[in-house]
Image (spheres, rainbow, N blue to C red):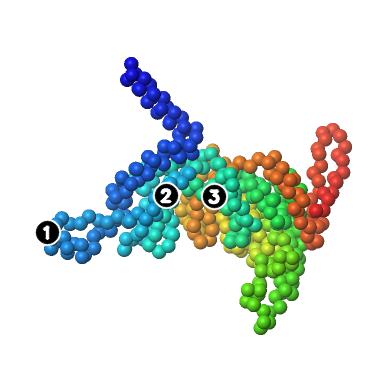
């Protein structure tokens, strides 16, 4: 009878562990998975390193010593483990390379390491010369994206997604001023942009939007936007006003430099961030929802407007960083077929994010000049996982990310809550968005009321 109860308890315990692993992978990992994985990695380490070709032959003096002492030939040496640290999503293994090894060897063997250690994913990163860190995740963290409850936020640094290694992906405008975001319909591109706008809303920044889809994406967030345009004609005028504002900011920087012999080096500035706080202009983030609507010309009459738009975008991308102007350009495609000057604009966009695309050519537009592996990863994104993307920059580094599903209601509530933070810029005042008009079917539409200046 006791054996029957013991067997029943064992079956219930196994069932509990399996259900926990299925429904709450994070809890399973923190309770059981991290222990099993740590033991498995330590036991298999030497054999896995040897099977993956990550060992080096014994040195000559060890070979000579073995011959003199008439001992067996020494075995190949594996990289030395410096630290094995568990995390909420996996393990972090830091190893010291042996002479003759290269960090690229570990990056090329990441798939074999993943299978050998029976983990979900392995990402290799060189920490410093001779030290490589392997970030191993124990489960699919992108299946159900749960952002950490408390993520430290800085000015112009917004947590927007979760990476495949379990870390938070930030959109940092101070490090990467301008970025490109491509993706097909229903790929999660608009949700990513919505998450970005909601993350910037509590900060002291000016949001400027260009949404040529009649404003359906950005105009619900109008309470937090300093300027909005919903058609190419207004967009052309808005971009021209931004260029004028940029020129005024540069005049302010020039006036405050006052370079002389007695001026300390730390007070010499070439951008807004070294200006005194009371003189520093508010940074401006420009969100362009669909760049193709700005770059396409349906007739000869539209070409002058199109050329002005592309020229102003290129000028803002080339000169805007020092004036505190940052670009976030979204589109389904961003190739040379959009016309003259578009590739020059793309070359200025350091950050690249590619959601699910319909063809390899679209992925090449984002990562073709950066990394062939990133192009392949963008093409392989599953259509049943909206919000999944490949994020990288011009340095060649990239990673898979997935943004949390931010509903439009949540983004609207955040923007309305922080509407009082919306700054007023004189050059952009004519483009201040009006309050949305309530659609009443079968009745006369009321006049739009102006949003009060904040």
Q: CA distance from mark 1 to mark 3?
A: 55 Å
Give percent across and percent down for residue 176.
Answer: 59, 60
Q: In the rendering, which numbered label is found on residue 85?
A: 2
The reply to whether discs 2 and 1 touch (Cβ–Cβ < 8 Å) is: no
Do we see residue 183 in this rendering? no
Tell me the CA gap for discs 2 and 1.
40 Å
Q: Residues within 10 Å of mark 3 (few under 14, many from 20)?
A: some
The residue under the point 41% across, 41% down is 34
Quadrant containing the N terminus in the rendered view: top left
Q: Residues within 10 Å of mark 2 (few under 14, many from 20)?
A: few
- Residue 342: percent from left, percent from top: 63, 60
Residue with the mark numbered 3:
168
Choose mark 2 or mark 1, whichever is in front. 2
Which residue is farthest front? Answer: 2
Q: Position of residue 312 (x, y in %)?
A: 70, 63
The residue depicted at 87 percent of the width and 44 percent of the height is 447
Q: Of 321 and 99, which appears nearest the observer?
A: 99
- Pick the front one: 366 or 55: 55
> Looking at the picture, does residue 2 appear above or below residue 220?
above
User: Which residue does the image show at 44% across and 37% down from the upper left?
Assistant: 31
Q: Residue at x 59, y 52 (%)?
A: 152
| x, y percent for residue 244 | 76, 66
- Residue 188 lies left or right of residue 33; in this view the side is right
Which residue does the numbered mark 1 point to in the structure image? 70
Q: From this viewpoint, is residue 33 visible?
A: yes
Q: Residue furthest top?
A: 1
Residue 191 picture quarter: top right
Q: Residues within 10 Å of mark 1 (few under 14, many from 20)?
A: few
Q: Secondary structure at mark 3?
A: strand
Label 2, secondary structure: give it.
strand
């Amino acid at each position: 009878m006791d054996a029957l109860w013991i067997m029943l308890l064992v079956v219930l315990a196994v069932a509990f562990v399996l259900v926990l692993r299925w429904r709450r992978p994070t809890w399973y990992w923190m309770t059981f998975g991290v222990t099993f994985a740590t033991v498995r990695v330590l036991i298999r380490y030497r054999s896995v390193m040897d099977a993956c070709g990550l060992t080096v032959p014994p040195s000559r003096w060890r070979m000579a010593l073995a011959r003199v002492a008439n001992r067996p030939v020494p075995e190949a040496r594996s990289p030395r483990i410096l630290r094995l640290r568990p995390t909420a999503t996996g393990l972090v293994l830091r190893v010291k390379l042996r002479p003759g090894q290269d960090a690229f060897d570990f990056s090329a063997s990441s798939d074999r390491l993943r299978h050998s250690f029976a983990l979900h994913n392995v990402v290799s990163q060189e920490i410093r010369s001779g030290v490589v860190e392997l970030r191993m995740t124990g489960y699919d963290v992108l299946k159900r994206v749960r952002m950490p409850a408390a993520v430290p936020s800085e000015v112009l640094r917004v947590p927007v997604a979760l990476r495949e290694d379990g870390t938070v992906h930030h959109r940092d405008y101070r490090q990467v001023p301008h970025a490109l975001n491509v993706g097909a319909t229903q790929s999660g591109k608009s949700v990513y942009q919505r998450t970005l706008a909601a993350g910037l809303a509590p900060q002291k920044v000016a949001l400027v939007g260009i949404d040529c889809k009649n404003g359906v994406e950005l105009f619900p967030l109008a309470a937090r936007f300093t300027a909005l345009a919903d058609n190419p004609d207004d967009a052309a005028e808005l971009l021209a006003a931004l260029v004028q504002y940029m020129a005024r900011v540069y005049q302010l920087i020039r006036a405050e430099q006052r370079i002389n012999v007695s001026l300390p080096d730390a007070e010499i500035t070439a951008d807004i961030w070294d200006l005194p706080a009371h003189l520093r202009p508010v940074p401006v983030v420009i969100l362009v929802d669909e760049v193709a609507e700005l770059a396409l010309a349906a007739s000869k009459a539209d070409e002058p407007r199109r050329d002005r738009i592309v020229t102003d975008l290129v000028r803002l991308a080339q000169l805007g960083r020092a004036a505190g102007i940052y670009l976030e350009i979204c589109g389904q495609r961003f190739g040379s077929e959009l016309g003259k000057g578009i590739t020059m604009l793309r070359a200025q966009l350091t950050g690249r994010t590619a959601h699910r695309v319909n063809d390899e050519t679209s992925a090449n537009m984002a990562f073709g000049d950066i990394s062939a592996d990133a192009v392949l990863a963008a093409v392989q994104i599953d259509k049943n996982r909206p919000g999944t993307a490949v994020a990288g920059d011009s340095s060649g580094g990239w990673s898979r990310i997935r943004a949390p599903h931010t509903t439009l209601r949540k983004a609207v509530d955040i923007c309305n809550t922080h509407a009082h933070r919306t700054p007023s810029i004189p050059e952009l005042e004519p483009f201040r968005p009006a309050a949305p008009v309530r659609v009443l079917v079968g009745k006369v539409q009321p006049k739009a009321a102006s949003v009060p200046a904040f």
